[in-house]
């Protein structure tokens, strides 16, 4: 068994930042355990212009941490003090990346330029292009290597270890996917940087190499929050990539075909009176890419119409950049659309030419992945993209109920109902910095007896060894396909009580089956994936339970639309009574939905009132004194 002060599980942008920051703060006994430095979402994903959201730093437009915090939490179901921490930490995290070589653009005077993103009243957003998070990872990996921080690859976490009272974490069990060998690691602290629930959905834009491991935290007893709040949006499926921003703003044709690729038609036309009405909504979809119940009617109708084609009519949907939509007349477009096209200098024929002028890397990205937009259409669907919920943490990103566990990145559910685009990248850096500072200041001493840990580890290893002595009856590929299909059918952006109730029955049965099935006779990779299925299946049970609670108590909001036969008509051209939405019960914007295991061993859900954004009016001498004495780390300390 190995032992470290701090174990970082995962090597995305937030996990890497935590390791680097810990080392910089003097915590040298650190190791990163990861499936691989080239795995995960951060290094394998992006969009047309992947956004990083931070405090405004350009020109004369005023900004402040409190102003940014209010915008971060404006969507509801987000704690105001955590929003203030993310805002206040954003300059530090951003400039740390700049010093490591991430090429965020600035002008000749050193000002870092910004632009407006969704849910953002100011110009706080910035970008390196399609690969912002990849650029972050590349720079952070270089720094990890420069600092000689230990990295163990091909390790997949299969169990978080806790003390007998489930008060704190004390280590983890990993499997080597190549050899099948198990390894126990003792750790005073765990930075849990395992990303979002990428393995839960069949229709997903998460990179195929990323599955997530939030189920391990839930299994260990960590509370979850806002699990029902996810983002979904249009994305390509042959190569998984968000078709946001300029992919929409150049006005491509939306084509549907039958399963064999025949009977092509511009299917959006049946829902709009004129071509310009249709194209104005397509253009707006670029700014408002994630599906949002608040944009129905509006740009999110595009997601619904795509859903109808793919899920109800069982057709395929494509974007075609080769020819203009029939009847395109720039002079008839609304002022916002026309002005953007004019100022961008793209009043030319074909969406591809417009995209080449506006954002040529967006074309090259697909070409490098085997898709030539000049010769073929781009198949798309409405895909799971991001979970705004996750494990619940405090203002130092420590789990609210499981001490020494620090969920950072997407696995930490800070975001609430809606969030400005790019805020997740900032949140990951802020969380990494906060967790590292707290560990360096409070948790460097050993408080777990080695003999006590050995007893815990041996007990849990014995359970795994016993399962390996029993033959495996489940095929992990079929089992994964089952819960992924269930989540895409019931837990996506179109939701109904009947569908989720039915899904939960199957989910609970599968959960019980996977946790009692043997693991004997499996090759190392199959053993790894069978173990991974256990925590993924557990997670999907909790997600569905929270989604059902949202349906019953909250209604349509954020990234989900709840159907109800007696609900509000969605759109006049959707006359089918199926398309009626349950309106939002808005007081729940002031609440956080928390979940965890109840006393009966099944999911338990309850509510917590959101804390307001603080309105600090500090005095330098007092703050300086509290900082020197480390009083700022006390549980009762307030912002």
Image (spheres, rainbow, N blue to C red):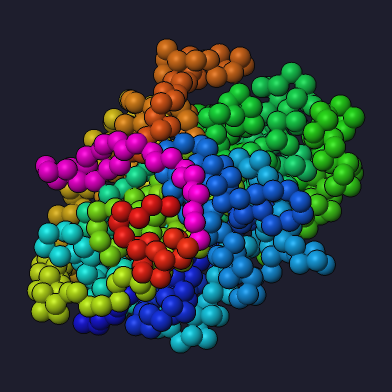
**Residue at position x 76%, y 45% in the image:** 321
| Nearer to us in this view, 475 or 171 | 171
**Residue at position x 34%, y 50% in the image:** 392
- 276 relative position to 233: left or right: right
Pinpoint residue 451: horizontal percent, then vertical percent: 10, 79
Q: Can residue 292 be found in the magenta stretch?
A: no
**Residue at position x 29%, y 80% in the image:** 4
| Nearer to us in this view, 148 or 257 | 148
Pinpoint residue 73: horizontal percent, then vertical percent: 50, 41
Q: Can residue 563 be seen here?
A: no
What is the total number of numbered labels drawn onto the structure image?
Answer: 0
Pinpoint residue 525: horizontal percent, then vertical percent: 32, 70
Q: Can residue 76 be seen here?
A: yes
Segment colored magenta: 594-620
Q: In which quarter of the image is residue 178?
A: bottom left
Q: Can residue 599 be found in the magenta stretch?
A: yes
Check the picture and name the quadrant holding the N terminus.
bottom left
- Say if 369 sits above or below 118 in the image: below
| Nearer to us in this view, 218 or 309 | 218
Pinpoint residue 558: horizontal percent, then vertical percent: 49, 35
Q: Quadrant of residue 369?
A: bottom right
- Say if 370 sits above or below 490 in the image: below
- 158 relative position to 372: left or right: left
- Say if 32 sits above or below 496 in the image: below
| Nearer to us in this view, 581 or 488 | 581
**Residue at position x 62%, y 16% in the image:** 573
């Amino acid at each position: 068994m190995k032992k470290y002060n701090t174990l970082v599980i995962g090597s995305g942008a937030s996990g890497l930042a935590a390791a680097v920051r810990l080392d910089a703060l003097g915590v040298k006994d650190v190791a990163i355990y990861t499936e691989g430095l080239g795995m995960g979402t951060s290094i394998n994903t992006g969009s047309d212009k992947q956004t990083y959201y931070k405090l405004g730093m350009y020109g004369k437009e005023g900004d402040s941490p409190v102003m940014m915090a209010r915008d971060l939490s404006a969507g509801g179901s987000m704690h105001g003090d955590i929003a203030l921490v993310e805002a206040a930490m954003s300059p530090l995290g951003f400039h740390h990346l700049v010093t490591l070589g991430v090429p965020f653009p600035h002008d000749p005077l050193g000002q870092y330029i910004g632009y407006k993103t969704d849910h953002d009243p100011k110009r706080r957003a910035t970008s390196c292009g399609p690969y912002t998070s990849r650029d972050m990872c590349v720079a952070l990996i270089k720094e990890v290597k420069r600092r000689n921080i230990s990295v163990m690859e091909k390790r997949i976490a299969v169990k978080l270890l806790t003390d007998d009272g489930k008060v704190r974490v004390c280590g983890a069990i990993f499997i080597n996917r190549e050899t099948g060998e198990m390894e126990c690691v003792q750790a005073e602290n765990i930075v849990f940087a395992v990303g979002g629930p990428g393995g839960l959905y069949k229709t997903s834009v998460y990179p195929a190499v990323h599955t997530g491991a939030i189920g391990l935290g839930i299994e260990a007893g960590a509370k979850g929050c806002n699990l029902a709040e996810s983002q979904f949006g249009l994305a390509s499926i042959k190569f998984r990539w968000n078709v946001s921003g300029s992919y929409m703003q150049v006005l491509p044709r939306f084509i549907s075909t039958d399963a064999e690729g025949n009977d092509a038609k511009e299917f959006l036309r049946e829902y709009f009176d004129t071509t310009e009405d249709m194209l104005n909504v397509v253009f707006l979809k670029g700014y408002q890419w994630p599906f949002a119940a608040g944009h129905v009617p509006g740009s999110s109708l595009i997601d619904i119409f795509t859903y109808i084609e793919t899920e109800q009519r069982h057709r395929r949907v494509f974007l075609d950049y080769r020819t203009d939509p029939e009847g395109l007349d720039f002079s008839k477009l609304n002022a916002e659309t026309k002005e953007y096209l004019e100022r961008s200098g793209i009043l030319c024929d074909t969406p591809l030419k417009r995209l080449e002028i506006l954002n040529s890397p967006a074309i090259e990205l697909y070409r490098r992945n085997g898709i030539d937009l000049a010769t073929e259409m781009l198949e798309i669907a409405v895909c799971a993209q991001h979970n705004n919920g996750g494990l619940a943490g405090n203002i130092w990103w420590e789990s609210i109920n499981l001490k020494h566990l620090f969920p950072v990145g997407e696995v930490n559910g800070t975001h609430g109902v809606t969030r400005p685009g790019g805020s997740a990248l900032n949140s990951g850096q802020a969380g990494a910095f906060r967790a590292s500072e707290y560990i360096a200041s409070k948790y460097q001493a050993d408080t777990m007896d080695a003999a006590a840990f050995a007893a815990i580890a041996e007990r849990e290893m014995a359970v795994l060894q016993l399962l390996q002595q029993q033959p495996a009856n489940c095929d992990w590929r079929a089992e994964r396909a089952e819960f992924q299909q269930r989540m895409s059918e019931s837990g996506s952006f179109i939701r109904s009580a009947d569908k989720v109730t039915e899904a939960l029955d199957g989910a609970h049965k599968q959960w019980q089956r996977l946790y009692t099935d043997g693991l004997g006779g499996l090759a190392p990779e199959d053993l790894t994936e069978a173990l991974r299925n256990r925590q993924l299946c557990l997670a999907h049970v909790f997600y569905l339970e929270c989604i059902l609670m949202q349906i019953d108590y909250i209604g349509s909001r954020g990234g989900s639309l709840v159907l109800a036969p007696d609900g509000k008509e969605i759109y006049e051209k959707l006359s089918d009574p199926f398309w009626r939405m349950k309106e939002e019960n808005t007081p729940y914007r002031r609440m956080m939905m928390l979940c965890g295991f109840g006393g009966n061993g099944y999911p338990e859900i309850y509510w917590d009132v959101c804390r307001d954004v603080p309105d600090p009016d500090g005095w330098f001498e007092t703050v300086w004194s509290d900082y020197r004495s480390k009083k700022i780390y006390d549980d009762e300390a307030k912002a």
